[in-house]
Image: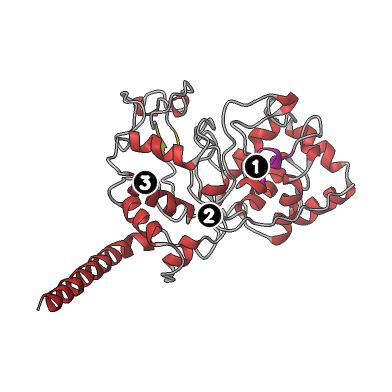
Amino acid sequence: MGSISFHIIKIGIFVLMTLQATVMSEAAEPAKSAYKRPSEIPFPIDNPYTAEKAALGKALYFEPRLSGAENMTCASCHNPSFGWEVPVKTAVGAQNTRLGRQAPTVLNIAWVHPLFWDGRAKTAEDQAKGPIEAAVEMNLPLPEAVKRLSAIPSYKAAFDRVFPGQGVTPDTIVKAIATFERTVVASYAPFDAWVEGDEKAISPAAKRGFDLFVGKAGCAPCHTGWNFTDNKFHDIGTTSTDVGRIAFEPNNPKAQFAFKTPSLRDIGQRAPYMHDGSIETLEEALMHYVQGGIDRPSRSPLMRPVALDASEIDDLIAFLRSLTGSKQIVTLPVLPN
């Protein structure tokens, strides 16, 4: 009799665990659908996609002649080998000048608006102008860039084909670069396969981590949608003295120390973290959020301490790592002489 009772209890526990897993899985379904990869890349009406324009933009992205000293490219700070960032605390600009902020990733820029950590650029075209002309970055006025490119027959011919009647201008230079950058999309990750129905694509720990992400841990209100960002600005209580978004929203007290919510796509390839590259590992970054950051009037109401135990933190890390796919192989363009 004792043996029979044991088996009944054991089966009962198994059924209960199965039912709990089913309920959790069903509860996660609506949340999963909100993170499904889109099937198309959006391009603006005033700068539509063409393959030739994207190819021209790719050449310009890797073109050192778009820097004053001809020693830097867009890829110098947004390197495809490191999640389209650089693996150092902050980027290094012209004259070996260390910049004040980490280089934001170019990944999924087609879905990002506005751009830069402080949101000072409304479009990818506006963003492309900034680093080229900035004295501490590529340090080349766009009119000078026009002269350089116009003097190279292959570039002049390419611009005439891609932009008939316009040729090489400051606007066509940044339109070409922005078009290429919009084609830079995060790699297909195990999480994507899971969202599309492959239950074996991610581990049970990662699945539990996703439930925490959209639930108890409170990550989803800011890291929402397939690109895992609300495209808004939040003070998350870092120790940085950089004033952030308030430079552009002086009447908004919540803009003090506020920075753009970054995407979490390919996050495993994009250390260090935060707007100033001050946090070296994904584990340290998560602990910052768990602890809630510095409590001050500008701190986002969405940022608060969260009571998570060690196993829950491990599950969240497992989920975050499931957002990184294989490294993309980017062939370098052959630049014209």
Point out the frontmost of discs 3 and 1. 3
Residue 78 magenta: yes
**Local secondary structure at mark 3:** helix
Instruction: Tell me the colour scheme of the image.
Output: secondary structure
Local packing at callout 1 (Cα closer than 10 Å; few below 14, some 14-19, many 20+) is: many
User: Rounded to the nearest whole Å, what is the CA distance between mark 3 and mark 1?
Assistant: 30 Å
Q: Residue at x 43, y 49 (%)?
A: 317
Q: Which residue is mark 2?
A: 324
Q: Is residue 84 left or right of residue 12?
A: right
In the displayed structure, would residue 178 be above or below residue 296? below
Amino acid type, label 2: Thr
Mark 3 near mark 1, Cβ–Cβ under 8 Å? no
Helix, strand or loop at label 1? It is loop
| For discs 1 and 2, the disc positioned in front in the rendered view | 2
- Report x, y in % for residue 52: 74, 59
Which region is colored magenta? 73-79
Q: Earlier in the sequence, mark 1 or mark 2?
A: 1
Q: Quadrant of the N terminus?
A: bottom left
Q: CA distance from mark 3 to mark 2?
A: 18 Å
Q: Amino acid at mark 3?
A: Ile
At numbered mark 2, what does the secondary structure look like: helix, strand or loop? loop
- At label 1, which amino acid type do we have? His
- In the rendered image, residue 212 lying in the magenta stretch gets the answer no
| Nearer-the-camera pick, 98 or 226 | 98
Disc nearer the start of the sequence (3/2): 3
Q: Which residue is mark 1?
A: 78
Mark 3 neighbour density, 10 Å: few (under 14) some (14–19) many (20 or more)? some
**Where does the image place residue 100, in percent across and percent down from the top left?**
58, 25
Q: Residue at x 78, y 30 (%)?
A: 68
Question: What residue is shown with label 3?
Answer: 313
Task: Determine whether, in the image, residue 215 is placed left or right of residue 160.
Answer: left
Where does the image place residue 192, in percent across and percent down from the top left? 47, 63
